[in-house]
Amino acid sequence: MSESTQVAIVGAGPAGLMLGHLLHLRGIDSVILENRSQDYVIERVRAGVLEQGTVDLMNEVGVGQRLMREGMRHDGLYFAFNGDRHHIDLAGLTGGRAITVYGQNEVVKDLIAARVATGRPLHFEVGDVSVHDFESGAPRVRYTRDGQSHEIVCDVIAGCDGFHGICRPAIGSHLRIYERTYPFAWLGILASASPSSPELVYSLHERGFALFSMRSPSVTRLYLQCAPEEDIANWPDDRIWEELRTRLRTSDGWEPNQGPITQKSITPMRSFVAEPMRRGRLFLAGDAAHIVPPTGAKGLNLAMADVWRLANALVEFYGSSRQSLLDTYSDRGLRRTWRAQRFSWWMTSMLHRFEDESPFDHRRQLADLEYLVSSRAAMTSLAENYVGTPLD
C-alpha cells in the first residue's frame, strides 16, 4: 500500500510529535511512525527539566495549558558539598529566565493529544521501518502495520527515532561519531513523597553524586551515582534511602522525605554526537543525533531546539522553494549541541567521583564548587547555561 506526504517523521517521542505539530500549524502535511505502543511512549520515565525556551515554545504553539497549571517553575537551584547547601538564583542572574519541572511523559501526553485533535496520521506499533532514496528528491519510508506492508513517498524524512533508531545507521559511513562513555551510571527512583526542598539539589559527597528533584507536589525524583554494571536487584529500598540520606543530608538538618518507591532503574552515562545531522533529504533530530549526560538537563531541550529549527527550514522550503535554512540546519544544530555537551560534561565532571581520581582531583572539584557559589560571574555562567539560551 502506497501513500504520499510532505514530511515523514520516524519516531513519536517529544521531537517527532513537536515537529509534526509545528508543521501542522504552518499547513505542512506529515505522517508520524512509531514502533512502540502509545502506552510505552507515554510511560517511559525520562527528562523532567524544561528550559525557558522549551516552555515558551510549548505556549506559543498552544500545547502549554497543562504545563502552566501543573509544571513547577524553579527560579533557582542548590549545590550541596562539604555538608552545606548553596543557592543559585537562576532567574535573578538571567533577567527572569527559569526552568520548569514537568516530566517528559507529560510533554508527550500533551503533544499526542494535540496530534490526535488535528486528525493527522500518527501510527504506533509499526514494524520493519526502513528509509530509502533520501539522497534523491523523492525519499521513501517502508513499514508494516497490522500485517500489511506500506510505503510512504515524501519530500523529506525526519529521523526523530532516538539513539537506537534506524535513521542514523542508514546514513552509515557518511557520519563522523564523537563519543565518551562515563565510568558510572545513575540509579534513579520515583517515590511517593512530597518534595522536602522547593528546588533541585545537586550534591557532591565522598560516596558519590546525588540529585534531589521532583515530578509533582507529591512525587519525588532522586538519583544516586553508581557503577554502570550494578544490578538493580542489589539495591533494596532500605539501602537506597540510607544512601540518599547519607549523600544529601546537610548540616542544617535538611534531607529528602521518604516514601514508597514506585519505580527504579539504572541509566548509563554517555556523551554522543553524530556529524552531520543531515544526509540529502534525511534530517536527524534529538537523540538520533546526540546524547548528553543528564547532569545538565539538556537532552529534551536540545531535541525541541532541533525540531524548531527544522520546522522553520521546512516552512521556508515549502513557502519559497529556498533551501538555505535546510542547508544550514546541521551546522546551526551542531553549534548548539556542542555548547550543551560542554556544559553537561563540566557539570558531570564537577559533581561525580571517578574511580581513578586522586585526592588532588577531589580537592579540585571542591575548589570548583567553592568558586562557583562565591563568584557572581561563575553563577551567572551556570545560570545562563542551565536555563538555556533562546532557540536559534
Image: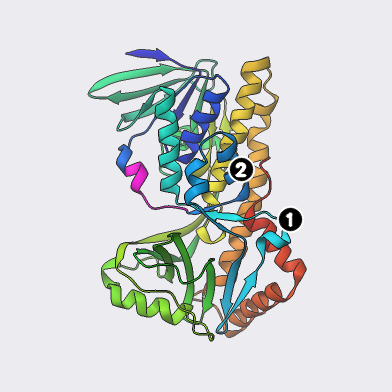
Q: Residue furthest right?
A: 377
Colour style of the rendered protein structure? rainbow
Q: Which mark is residue 151?
A: none
**Residue 209 appears in the picture as rendered:** yes
**Residue 275 appears in the picture as rendered:** no
Q: Which mark is residue 56?
A: 2
Labels 1 & 2 near each other (Cβ < 8 A): no
**Stretch in magenta:** 40-47
Q: Position of residue 219 (x, y in %)?
A: 39, 62
Q: Position of residue 311 (x, y in %)?
A: 59, 29
**Along the line of sight, the residue nearer the viewer: 334 or 112:** 112
Instruction: Label 2, secondary structure: give it.
Output: helix
Instruction: Note whether 130 is above or below 378 in the view shown.
Output: above
Q: Is residue 44 magenta?
A: yes
Instruction: Check disc 2: other Cα within 10 Å, few if <14, some if 14-19, many if 20+.
Output: some
Q: Residue at x 64, y 75 (%)?
A: 369
Instruction: Label 1, secondary structure: give it.
Output: loop
Give the CA distance from mark 1 to mark 2.
15 Å
